[in-house]
Image (tube, grey):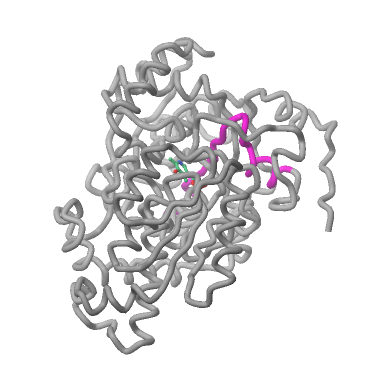
Amino acid sequence: MKPIQPDLNSPLIQDLIALREVSWFNPAAGSLAQALPHVGLDKHNVADAEARLQRFAPYLSRVFPATRATGGIIESELVAIDAMHKEMNRLSSQSLLGTLWLKKDSHLPVSGSIKARGGIYEVLTHAEKLALEAGLLNESDDYTRLDSPALRAFFAGYRIAVGSTGNLGLSIGIMSAQLGFEVTVHMSADAREWKKRKLREHGVKVVEYAQDYGVAVEQGRLAAQADPRCFFIDDENSRTLFLGYATAAQRLRRQFVEQNITVDEQHPLFVYLPCGVGGGPGGVAFGLKLAFGDHVHCFFAEPTHSPCMLLGVYSGLHDGIAVQDIGIDNRTAADGLAVGRPSGFVGRAMERMITGYYTLSDEHLFALLNTLYRSEGIALEPSALAGMAGPWITTANTQWQEHFTQRQWQNATHLVWATGGGMVPEAEMANYLARAAQAASVFW
Ligand SMILES: *Cc1c(COP(=O)(O)O)cnc(C)c1O
């Protein structure tokens, strides 16, 4: 079926084509009760995922020493970024009420990005299924037994494949290789050299493409289809990846308790998530909705050159349209977000749960990196900054402002989800920071 073109004359589509920064509040966003039936998953699925990660915790703690402090649970810090808050207020001449926090998935152990949630979870799910079916494992076992020559030899008889712009490949490659699988990562042209190098050091097979993410995924899918012992991890459609991401929410809820952060009607929570194909931000947002109901409001952030989810949801065409179909090139320094066609599963499942979407230029991603680095000393990869402008962009919308009382804004928690950068090599980070220092400092 040939995709229908959206109304190219609509002002929003015109702005997207012109690569102008836009924001859009979805009129179809509704209450949790209205939205939940459209997802096809519920709190029981997320609870299953949490239990599975708990079963694997002793194993992860054993094979990845960086997870020992948290008992094998791969989790990130939640930090207040007051200096950034002040500096952004100064630069924007807007005074954001409430408090500003950073969720540092950028520094998750094992693979240094949000993909350490979904990617690792899906590999573990597959490994568990194979081992249970073969009678080599029981759910009540101590899973450290997976770290044995016999189990590694068993997994070596199976293959895993994935297409990626870099970080998903890194997570899946490292986890799969650790278990013993033969793993192939199909990398898009955007993927950074150091990510490929790191994977090869882990014994992962890396196949490089001159084209973008969509092509890398398609080639990975085709290669896996020809091989019955090969499991293809489908970033565009996977419910398993999605559930891995969703487990972030209950843990965040515990971190909020530790920090004395209340979320209720009078204390709304606003979360700003960088979006590529949609699985990461979609899964996290789903978990957050289950955990905090109608008191949490999620926004997706994309580069002006890759606004695939905004285009898919706004046009209603979802994965039936790619940014290239309206002449956008999908070329951005935010390699983790360089996706031209959104996940149809996530777009359809989550459209009623996501309050709004906005886009940012690469120049502004770098400007935000500069401001964050100078104010807080935190260095991230460009993709991870997309959420940072969210509090100021969204509260500039008068209707959104009026949706809440002054009191609610004063009590608000703004949470920016930092999605990657913790493992970027020093020289590469120095390049990012140098470019960031050149970016326009006052941008509103
Ligand atoms: C993958 C990624 C995202 C977005 O996740 P999707 O599942 O592709 O939407 C955001 N930031 C970084 C750094 C990523 O690697």
Question: How far across and how far down the image is residue 148, in percent?
Answer: 19, 74
* Quarter of the rendering containing residue 6: top right
Q: Nearer the viewer, residue 24 or 241?
A: 241
Examine the rendering and report whether any part of residue 56 can be seen: yes
Residue at image x 24%, y 83%? 140
Q: Looking at the image, which residue sits at the far bottom? A: 135
Quarter occupied by residue 368: top left
Q: Picture coordinates of residue 408 (x, y %)?
A: 45, 35
> Residue 213, percent across and down?
57, 46
Would you place residue 325 above or below residue 141 in this image? above
Question: Residue, x 35% and y 68% (percent of image)?
Answer: 181
- Near-viewer residue (430 or 87): 430
Region rendered in magenta? 292-314
Q: Position of 263 compared to 296: left or right?
A: left
Q: Residue 22's spot in the image, x, y percent?
A: 64, 28
Residue in the image at 52% along x and 77% along y: 228
